[in-house]
Image (spheres, rainbow, N blue to C red):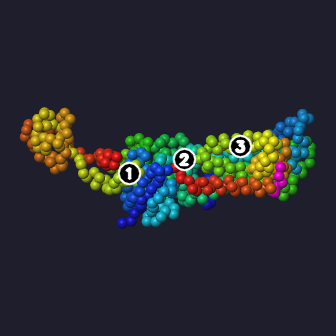
């Protein structure tokens, strides 16, 4: 299997404080990899090291199997879009295209891709946050990169903008590009990513698929009346340790396959069941569980 | 490299501050080189004679501001070229497109060289036109300096302006900002240099000797050798033209080196 990104014991220290500590991750070609962790976990520092903006204290990294000698196949957006405020969107991209060694003709293509052609002549400082983010994505795409490194790509966007950005990222991945994105929004990673690396205090807690991460846990939610009869039946069927009651709402630590049997027992006891629903474990719960173990 | 230089030139060309600096430098040079002296001449109280304003001496008028006030404007230009990348947080945007810091930095140096050359050419054109105007008003013959003198003047002026701009670039990279490098640079050029020359040097022989190796006094000596009036701020032939040229060129190389070395070795955070 070939990797777009591979780090081995990558470490960055500021004085004696490790910002990133012995980090080993692999991002497979063609996947969307989520780098998950709270603020200060070391996500941005890691991404900056991948891009050569920060030199690692120790460890090594490869991009597409080689030590990075350039970023010709990489497009990146780090800590939000930054541009020259007095230049128009189009001129900003022309400047960056010149730095990238890309033809200026590519500018109009990427403006079209992010739907900014109509506003490209306007000065960057007048752009809304959503437009700035789209211009940032246009800059990422200038080199038609194979690997996209996106740091908190939906940060600051409104819900519609977030949904739009997530859709765009998935579309780019479907075109065969590899995407490495960082986020502290757990639901976002769950929606977009194929695999995830969970980072906390500079250390990798786990690297796995989102499906594997969420395969354990989960609970069955039951809403039933009368509550006291329902509680009696449920504790008898699954055991008191597995029943968490909140008035008429019960969350049961049981496999999803138990739902039909539990429903039948409740109905047989004269209990009215208004809700019976399997709750997927939230990635947030997983994250807190993992970091809780760590701390 | 060509496209990197084009990128930097685009940034500066679209920036009104760059043109404002050029306009102020030209206005100051014309005002204090021609307008004020000519008014003084008309009043009969001129400290400078008519000769200094005629075409034969326009090179001296053009370079007279470079040791101090036009030099200060060149320093601000240098700070803006490099320091704005910190202010706008655009280093990362540039370096993820082109991770070669050497190439990006070289493009910036080429841009300040192009900018100062433009500025020097505008100053020479403005002073030449003013000198023709004065000659016409005073019914004097228009006699130009030799081509060699003009070329030498242009070269010396470009060297001084680029040296000050390179100091601005170096200060911007050392301090990773815009405001502080401009503030400190101006304090050095407008206050400390004058204090050293006017107060410290006459009292302390060691400081008088030190003056011969500082950038400002050497720029002043170079300007003096090119015909600038000794009444202009900072213009004083304390060393010969050869010494001054070598010193200013050495400072140019040193400032470029310091900025490049720091940019290369530091993290972009």
The answer to whether residue A47 is seen in the rendering is: no
Q: Which mark is residue B188?
A: 3
Which residue is drawn at the image coordinates 54% and 47% (left, top)? B89
Relative image position of residue B102 (x, y in whole percent): 60, 59
Instruction: Judge from the rendering whether residue A171 lies leftward or rightward of residue A102; answer left or right.
Output: left
The answer to whether residue A70 is seen in the rendering is: yes
Q: Give the quadrant of the N terminus of chain A.
A: bottom left
Q: Tag 1's secondary structure?
A: strand
Labels 1 and 3 share a subunit: no
Location of mark 1 (residue): A199
- Alpha carbon distance from label 3 to label 2: 27 Å
Question: In the rendered image, which quarter is residue A173 located in?
Answer: bottom left
Instruction: Judge from the rendering whether residue A245 lies leftward or rightward of residue A168; answer left or right.
Output: left
Q: Tag 3's secondary structure?
A: helix
Question: In the rendered image, which quarter is residue A24 located in?
Answer: bottom left
For the magenta stretch, what is the residue range? Answer: B238-242
Badge 3 sits on which subunit? B
Q: Nearer the viewer, residue B20 or A283?
A: A283
Badge 1 sits on which subunit? A
Q: Tag 2's secondary structure?
A: loop
Q: Nearer the viewer, residue A24 or A128?
A: A24
Badge 2 sits on which subunit? B
Which residue is drawn at the image coordinates 41% and 56% (left, top)? A23
Location of mark 2 (residue): B89
């Amino acid at each position: 299997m070939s990797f777009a990104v591979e780090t081995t014991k990558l470490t960055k220290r500021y004085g004696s404080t490790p910002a990133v500590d012995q980090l080993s991750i692999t991002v497979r070609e063609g996947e969307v990899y989520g780098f998950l962790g709270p603020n200060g976990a070391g996500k941005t520092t890691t991404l900056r090291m991948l891009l050569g903006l920060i030199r690692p204290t120790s460890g090594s990294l490869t991009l597409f199997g080689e030590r990075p000698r350039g970023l010709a196949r990489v497009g990146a957006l780090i800590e939000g879009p930054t541009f020259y405020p007095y230049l128009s969107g189009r001129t900003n991209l022309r400047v960056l295209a010149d730095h990238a060694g890309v033809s200026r003709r590519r500018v109009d293509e990427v403006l079209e891709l992010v739907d900014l052609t109509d506003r490209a002549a306007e000065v960057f400082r007048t752009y809304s946050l959503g437009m700035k983010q789209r211009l940032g994505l246009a800059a990422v795409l200038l080199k038609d990169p194979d690997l996209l490194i996106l740091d908190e790509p939906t940060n600051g966007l409104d819900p519609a903008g977030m949904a739009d950005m997530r859709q765009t990222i998935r579309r780019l991945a479907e075109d065969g590009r590899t995407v490495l994105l960082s986020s502290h929004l757990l639901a976002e990673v769950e929606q977009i990513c194929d695999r995830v690396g969970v980072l906390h205090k500079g250390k990798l807690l786990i690297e796995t698929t989102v499906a594997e991460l969420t395969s354990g846990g989960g609970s069955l939610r039951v809403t039933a009346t009368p509550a006291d009869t329902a509680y009696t039946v449920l504790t008898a069927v699954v055991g008191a340790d597995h029943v968490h009651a909140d008035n008429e709402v019960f969350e049961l630590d049981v496999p999803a396959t138990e739902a039909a049997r539990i429903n039948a027992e409740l109905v047989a006891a004269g209990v009215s069941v208004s809700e019976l629903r399997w709750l997927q474990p939230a990635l947030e719960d997983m994250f807190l569980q993992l970091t809780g173990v760590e701390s | 490299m060509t496209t990197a230089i084009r990128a930097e030139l685009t940034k500066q060309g679209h920036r009104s501050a760059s043109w404002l600096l050029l306009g102020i430098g030209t206005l100051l040079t014309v005002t204090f080189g021609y307008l004020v002296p000519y008014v003084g001449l008309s009043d009969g109280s001129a400290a400078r004679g008519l000769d200094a304003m005629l075409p034969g001496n326009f090179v001296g008028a053009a370079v007279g501001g470079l040791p101090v006030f036009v030099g200060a404007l060149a320093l601000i230009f240098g700070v803006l070229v490099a320091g704005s990348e910190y202010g706008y947080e655009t280093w990362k945007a540039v370096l993820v497109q082109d991770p070669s810091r050497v190439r990006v930095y070289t493009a910036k140096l080429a841009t300040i060289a192009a900018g100062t050359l433009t500025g020097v050419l505008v100053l020479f054109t403005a002073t030449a036109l003013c000198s023709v105007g004065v000659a016409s008003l005073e019914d004097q013959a228009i006699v130009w300096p030799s081509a060699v003198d003009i070329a030498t003047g242009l070269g010396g002026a470009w060297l001084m302006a680029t040296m000050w701009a390179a100091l601005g670039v170096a200060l911007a990279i050392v301090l990773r900002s815009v405001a502080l490098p401009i503030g400190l640079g101006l304090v050095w050029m407008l206050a400390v240099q004058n204090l050293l020359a006017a107060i410290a040097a006459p009292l302390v022989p060691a400081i008088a000797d030190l003056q011969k190796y500082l950038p400002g006094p050497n720029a002043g000596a170079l300007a003096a050798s090119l015909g600038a009036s000794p009444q202009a701020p900072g213009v004083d032939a304390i060393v010969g033209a050869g010494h001054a040229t070598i010193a200013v060129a050495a400072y140019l190389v040193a400032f470029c080196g310091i900025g490049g070395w720091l940019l290369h070795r530091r993290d972009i955070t």
